[in-house]
Amino acid sequence: MANFDKSLHANTVIADIILVINCGSSTLKYKLLDITANQILLKGVFEGIEQQLVQHNYEWLDDKKQSHPTYNAVFNADYATCFNTIAEVIKTIKCHSPTAVGHRVVHGGEEFIKPTLINANVIAKIERLSALAPLHNPINLQGIGLCLDLFPNVPHIAVFDTAFHQTMPDYAYRYPIAESWYSNHNIRKYGFHGTSHQYVAQQAANYLQKPLATLNLISLHLGNGDSVTAIQQGQCIDTSMGFTPLAGLMMGTRCGDIDPAIPLYMQQTGNMSPSQVSDELNHQSGLLAVAGNQDMREILQQSNNGDPTSQLAIDMYCYRIKKYLGAYLALLGHVDAIIFTAGVGENSAEIRSRCCQQLESFGINFDANLNEQAMTDISTINTSKSPIKLFVIKTNEERQIANEVSTFIKELNN
Ligand code: ADP
């Protein structure tokens, strides 16, 4: 493996072409962005890596800004083959080579509160944090190792999903349980989806033409995984996910907040093993458990056709979002804007409408027509008199990672 310490290169490279790597279990997503020209030069996804039957879809932009979507099937490919394919594609389509690489890393624990130049020491720390994210950090690290070999002469920067939430005060991130569970086992609230919350918060600030540091916001990331974050003066003060991404809102297949005694009860009296309970709560719960389906589009359709379990699932989903909205309105006192983002938040006028109804006394005045029309990267769906702005903002985690990497490199060079 190549020498990890790239700090020398970081001093000499102007990072305007950023390769962003999001290496997950069984999928590998990547984007090559030209930050100066504000363009995506190449983006792609490998799916089915665990099954070793990989499908590769990618799209690239030529000199004339013409887009070329391409589909490729690679059989028996592992992660190493996929990374080699990325390098080959970059060469074949004569794209610019990356001047820096940004890696999404899910868990940064309490150690990593900002983008970090990857070296052997950082890799060892991310490895130690694998105990807190066994499904994510090891695979993120595998991607980092392979990519370092492929692009050894440019800086590689880790950007952590948990970093944005590290500004939470202790009374928000500590659980009312034994202190030794925190000090010996690192059990506390970390929060996830930080890159998405930070991106949409910054987009709202740009739209309002105000510094993010002056704004109080609530951002609702509603996708397959769901989380809500309270942002005060630009900083996270609380978020709904916790020690793991299982906590908080009702999700596609995750239960969100439930009585913590339930898993113990099911082990003791339901004859279930810890791994069965874990599988049930992570993969068989949420919308899937109630509606028999985790896809919100289909649930909404079923609900409109009168299916009672789909109607119940939507009632529960929106009820739980409203409870968090109420809690975070109370925590923040003054709120400038509420943001809807991710698959459901960006696309479902019905869910947004149900979450915003009967909240006028809290300063939320929602415009039904604007809500139906919200389609662009950023739309407002509040009435002109609404004290709180309501935004629908398309999230872009890769763009946020690329921006953070670019800023990081510029600061290193100054
Ligand atoms: P992930 O968390 O995997 O990135 P997404 O952010 O893509 O997921 O969100 C996926 C969810 O968004 C699915 O439940 C999907 O049904 C939902 N979704 C996508 N488009 C729509 C739509 N037009 N209406 C309602 N839900 C939608």
Image (cartoon, rainbow, N blue to C red):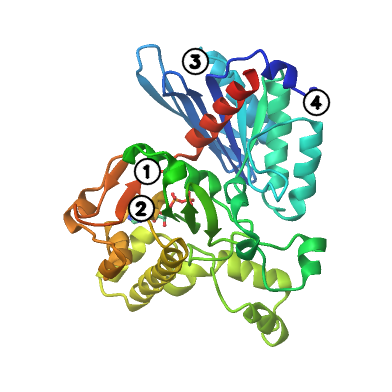
Q: Quadrant of the N terminus?
A: top right
Label 4 to label 2: alpha-carbon separation: 49 Å
Q: Quadrant of residue 121?
A: top right
Residue contact between numbered discs 4 and 2, judged by CB atoms under 8 Å: no
Task: Select label 2 or label 1 by which is in front.
Answer: 2
Q: Residues within 10 Å of mark 1 (few under 14, many from 20)?
A: many
Task: Select label 4 or label 2 by which is in front.
Answer: 2
Name the residue tied to disc 3.
93
- Residue 88 in the figure: left or right of residue 8: left
The residue sitting at 74% across, 32% down in the picture is 145
The disc at residue 336 is 2
Disc 4 residue type (three-letter): Met
Secondary structure of the residue carrying numbered label 1: helix
Extreme residue toward the bottom, this view: 269
Residue contact between numbered discs 2 and 1, judged by CB atoms under 8 Å: yes
Disc 3 residue type (three-letter): Ile
- Residue 196 in the figure: left or right of residue 160: left
| Mark closer to the chain start, 4 or 2 | 4
Name the residue tied to disc 1.
204
Task: Select label 3 or label 4 by which is in front.
Answer: 4
Image: 361 above or below 148: below
* Pick the front one: 86 or 392: 392
Residue contact between numbered discs 1 and 4, judged by CB atoms under 8 Å: no
Residue contact between numbered discs 3 and 4, judged by CB atoms under 8 Å: no
| Mark closer to the chain start, 2 or 1 | 1
Q: Residues within 10 Å of mark 4 (few under 14, many from 20)?
A: few
Q: Residues within 10 Å of mark 2 (few under 14, many from 20)?
A: some
Label 2 to label 1: alpha-carbon separation: 10 Å
Q: Quadrant of the C terminus?
A: top right
Name the residue tied to disc 4.
1
Disc 1 residue type (three-letter): Ala
